[in-house]
Image: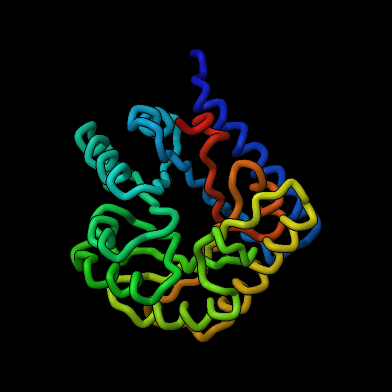
Amino acid sequence: MIMSPIEANLQQIHREKDAVIAGRLANLDQNLRQNVTLVAVSKTKPAAVIFEAFQAGQRHFGENYVQEGVAKVAELAALGLTRKQGLIWHFIGPLQSNKAKLVAHHFDWVHGVDRLKIAVALSNHRDASLAPLNVCVQVNVSGEDSKSGVDPQEALSLATEIATLPNLNLRGLMTIIENTPAVATQRAQFQKMHALWLTLRRYPPRSGMMIDTLSMGMSQDFKIAIEEGSTMIRIGSAIFGARN
């Protein structure tokens, strides 16, 4: 059987991911989790390619635009792909409070929480019949004005406030680093995030707080992100091709 381009891309990313993990474990780095989750970022792509990736074994999918993501959730549900079949939806990026209800109803993860107001809105709108909504605090580790995210010095305080809210499960931290080819800069920002995440993991455990996720790394830098401790990578163009 001829392999589709999407299936081939997924397999290539998994090979590269697993090779990086094996290299870190060979160096006895115990700070790196062996399981690194791949989120296929499907924004601007049709539901048909998500279906194709699902058929190839992919289960986690990320969307950046609320209405587009909700429409794909409905379209794939009509094809029989829902949470019951293992489909897991991640909302990535900035979120306005007036869109929180849609996200709370249709998604399983939210990566871009950078204000308590957004977390409260998600908590209020999450249906108690569903599992708690998994959330990550977005950190602006590069300090760029163009990027969303809380200042690193405020991240731990925000995280502990979010952990007190019902219907949410605080899973960890997320970042989008500076878009630069300078590997030293990439590595330094990933290292800063990893140190912040380790600090948060040392906080006393409490209900609504399960710090096991450090979401960082995209198509152009995911291997360096994994080297520096990422547990979840968000890959779009390397799977689905250039965005429309």
Q: Is residue 139 left or right of residue 46?
A: right
Residue 35 horizontal/vertical position (percent): 57, 54
Q: Is residue 182 left or right of residue 13?
A: right
Residue 90 horizontal/vertical position (percent): 39, 52
Image quadrant occupied by the C terminus: top left
Residue 154 horizontal/vertical position (percent): 54, 80
Q: Residue furthest top?
A: 1
Residue at 71 percent across and 51 percent down: it is: 224
Compared to 11, does 41 lie above or below? below
Q: Is residue 61 left or right of residue 106?
A: right
Q: Nearer the viewer, residue 102 or 94?
A: 94
Residue at 38 percent across and 58 percent down: it is: 109
Residue at 38 percent across and 70 percent down: it is: 169
Residue 116 horizontal/vertical position (percent): 38, 76
Residue at 54 percent across and 42 percent down: it is: 235
Compared to 96, does 208 lie above or below? below
Could you say which quadrant of the image residue 185 lies in? bottom right
Compared to 48, does 99 lie above or below? below
